Image (tube, rainbow, N blue to C red):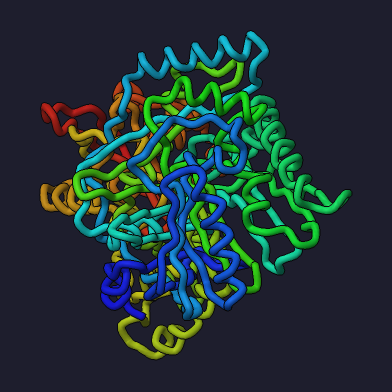
Amino acid sequence: MNDIELISLMRRDGTVLATLPGENDCFCTGLFLEPFTILEAWSIPEVESVFTEAETLLGEGCHIAGFISYEASPAFDREQKVLPDGQFPLLRLACYRKSPERIRLPYRNDFVLKTAFVPELRKEEYTARINKIHENIVAGNIYQANLTFRSEAPPVHNPEQLFLNLQTRHPVPYAAYLNLCGLKILSLSPELYLETMDGRHVSSSPMKGTAKRSPIPERDRKIAENLAADPKNLAENLMITDMVRNDLGRICKRDSISVDPLFHVDTYNTVHQMISTVHGGLKDNIGLFELFKATFPPASITGAPKISAMKVISENEKSPRRVYTGAVGCICPDRTFRFNVAIRTLTCYHDRVETGVGGGIVYDSGADSEWQEALLKCRYATYALPDFQVFETMRWTKREGFVLLDEHIRRAETSQVYFRRRFIPGAVEEALERMCPELESNPAYRDGACVKFLLEYDGRVKVELTPPRKPEWRGLGLRLLLASERTDSDNVFLYHKTTNRNFYDTRYHAVRQSGFHEMLFLNRKGELTEGAVSNVFVRKGARWFTPELECGLLPGIWRRRQIEVLDAEETVLSPADLMGADEIRVGNSLRGTGVAAYLENEEDHRCLFTGNPA
């Protein structure tokens, strides 16, 4: 099914996309079409009767998909306090006679929310609410409370495209799209609330603990490792995991509860998240209402103890949560089901788009860091990576074959994995092998070739061949230009070789036409980074230096080898270091090494450096 056909179906009232129980492919989902009835509850007394009716329909072979709002909580326990809200359904379940079709979601990267979300409260108000929670913690009323707030953006007129784009950019295992009675809900949740794949065993995966990603793969891995060992995050995650154990203990057989894995860190486009998974064997004859009565709302979005935390939440949140932090999912006639925790979820109204964000507040939580973390979480809806491919370029000769092939593949794999794209082991080698007859027989490649391989989103490999470059740099005294325009060291694409390099390509072609060989760049802090197509090394006396990765540059293969050969130090370099240099070298694995004879400042045309390349 192509994207146009799917979008047309998504626009029909009653359509739901929800991942099916046991599904482990983020891009595969269940397509539910043409419900014969919609069950809904607008008041607390109606909730249990809706569940009873749903049980009856499941017994008749029907499939069900829909959502449960956070404000439905008192239906399962009257002590669970929530803000009153009579303007939004507590429960809406679509019922289908036809089984859902398992489909693969199309790749879309052509639409994003361009307007940032506006929080319903100011930072000062948020801080005051955190202070109130701290007072409750000090008083011994609670250990933790999950404080949230709503944010709004202007209405979106094509939520179907938005959902497909968001799931392409931020693939998560529990995504869902609901178009029910004119209400469109886009849930990009990475958190599992409840699932059973056989009707006998149930799992829940509370998510607690967040860390912002680094654009540098090595640093990014370290951040994930630090999150997995951070005492504060471990304590919070364990607290919520124990709550889930207790909740499941009400409906599971004695001694059947286990946790595996505990404190696992999953990586998403902008953040790392700590997740634990609790398993249990269900008691006999447990119905849907009993399942939700024991576990709803999810422990990770309330606090501890749950009843007390919900009371504090109701006293300190500004507006009802609605579907946010509720649950979205589907149920099959065989009593298998999957429901997410409805975080990272957009509700599309005719006049606005609404989402919720928040975090767990404990005794040592700081208002500033919690506010920034909440705003970071909101980026899932507006953070847009441009369409791009990871690529590598290398030399091929009949004598050497593909030069430095293993290192190029390793770097491409690192970038592909970093961007959470598919990498197929052996696919690059196979694609290059298929090009060997052309390389061996075509006279254009008698003296070698420039070989470029590109990786698609799904791991497919494309190879491009061009005749070999003439030696542009070797044996020449290079003329370099220091750019006036600065780069942003927070730009993730500076650290990865991708087709999203129009800025560098444009500047490089312009500088070549002006009689220079290469252009060097500074970041916004005035630190030296790299050339448009090269890394940079500076010699002072007998010692060599090169910009450290954090300044914003590609970890070049030539760069790594030069660090070893020259015993170079990675450090922060400035224009003053260029002016005081005894030698400046630039290079990459394709062009080799070039030595600077002249460096000019683009801003005022001053000569910053002259050298003797010989």
Q: Quadrant of the N terminus?
A: bottom left
In this view, the residue in front, 93 or 163, is: 93
Left or right, 43 with reference to 262? left
What percent of the width, then of the height, locates residue 40? 43, 56
Task: Name the residue rendered at 53%, 35% in the picture.
Answer: 211
In this view, the residue in front, 117 or 597, is: 117
Task: Name the residue rendered at 19%, 45% in the picture.
Answer: 351
Which quarter of the picture shows residue 312?
top right
What percent of the width, then of the height, locates residue 434? 47, 85
What percent of the width, then of the height, locates residue 20? 55, 68
Q: Quadrant of the C terminus?
A: top left
Residue sticking out furthest to the right: 255
In this view, the residue in front, 434 or 546, is: 434
Left or right, 546 with reference to 276? left
What percent of the width, then of the height, locates residue 479? 22, 42
Task: Name the residue rendered at 46%, 45% in the picture.
Answer: 69
Q: Is residue 529 visible?
A: yes
Q: Is residue 261 above or below residue 71?
A: below
Task: Name the residue rendered at 56%, 57% in the picture.
Answer: 51
Q: Is residue 470 above or below residue 558?
A: below
Report the number of discs.
Answer: 0
Q: Is residue 404 visible?
A: no
Left or right, 197 with reference to 480? right
In this view, the residue in front, 520 or 69, is: 69
Q: Is residue 443 above or below residue 486?
A: below
Q: Is residue 265 above or below residue 543?
A: below
